[in-house]
Each structure stands twice: as structure tokens, then as C-alpha cells.
Image: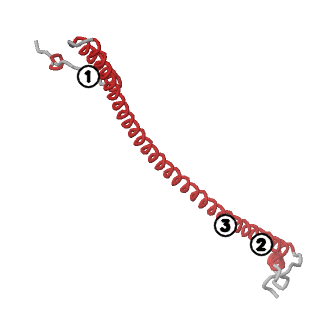
Amino acid sequence: MARDSYDDDRVVVIEKDSTNGIGMLLLGLAVGAGAALLFAPASGRETRERISREARRAGRRVKDMTDELGDRVADQVERARFSVDERVGRAKDAVQSRVDAVNDAVSASRTAASHARADIERAVEHSKQAYADGRRAYGERTRRASGAPGPMSDEPHPRNDAEGAEDGVAGQG
């Protein structure tokens, strides 16, 4: 039987948690220093002095480590703050650019709408004028056809020519 190659592989997962590791390191140092002092062949007074000296030394080391850790954290916070400020600045610039583009588009739209309105108003005026001219021409043609005197009475009346043609008199004289 053939076995899949992934069945033979072993997977190892290592988790790293730096905050817990530092605390465990300090605890190990303290326990180790205390055990070394207690099991060292020395008198009680020497042992107490050595414990006191090592405690002060351990305290200085802890203070140095916490100062160094604080400096690292402060540097990381400053870098993060700078990065956030930079990204916020870029976002503000992008938003302002889009706001400016929208404002330009709105302004252009208002200008175009104003021009279109003026064009429409001119077209309506021309249409009204053409309608009025058409009504006037129709009225004149209707008056001429009915025999009523109109503003152009010097033209021959079309009805008279038609009447003569009906009577058979037209062209005979």
C-alpha cells in the first residue's frame, strides 16, 4: 500500500511570546541567584551580605532591562504614531482631492445648466414668435379667403377669380 507523503511529516509549532519570556527569565535569575547563595559554603553574615549585594545587583539589572524595554516600546510607539499620522495625512489629502473634484464637477454642472436654461429660454421665445407669426399669417389668409379686407388689400381677391371661373365668364370679356 502506498502512503501519502504528508502522513510521514511531523509538524512542530513554536509559539513566541516575548512578554512572558522576559518575566520567566527574571524569575529564573532570581531563583538561581538565591539557590547559589544558600548552598555556597559561607557564614550567615557573609551569606546575608552576598544576598544583599546580589539583590541590589539584580535590582539594577531589572531596572536597566525595564528602562531598555521602555525605550524600545517608546520607539515603537513613536514609529507607529508617525506611520499613523502619515497615513492619516495621505487619507486627508486624498479626501480633499476628491472633494475638490466634486466641487469642480458641481460648478461645471451649474454653469452647463445655466447655459442650457438660456438656450431653452431662447428656443421658447423663438417658438412663441413663430407661433404668433403663424397665427397672424393664418388669420390673414382666412380673411383674404372670406373677402374681408385685410392688410394686403391691393392683391387680387382669390374668390373673385374663382367666381368668374364658375360662371364661365372668366377669360371672356
The location of residue 97, given as percent across then percent down, is: 51, 54
Residue drawn at 23 percent across, 15 percent down: 36
Q: Quadrant of residue 69?
A: top left
- The numbered disc on residue 30 is none
Horizontal arrangement in the rendering, residue 161 relative to residue 85 (left or right): right
158 or 19: nearer the viewer: 19
In the rendered image, which residue does mark 2 sit on? 133
112 or 97: nearer the viewer: 97
The location of residue 84, given as percent across then percent down, is: 45, 43
Q: Amino acid at mark 2?
A: Asp
Horizontal arrangement in the rendering, residue 170 relative to residue 100 (left or right): right
Determine the secondary structure under disc 2: helix
Residue drawn at 22 percent across, 13 percent down: 42
Outermost left residue: 1
In the rendered image, which residue does mark 1 sit on? 14
Q: Earlier in the sequence, mark 1 or mark 2?
A: 1
Q: Amino acid at mark 1?
A: Ile
Looking at the rendered image, the quarter that the N terminus falls into is top left
In the rendered image, which residue does mark 3 sit on? 119
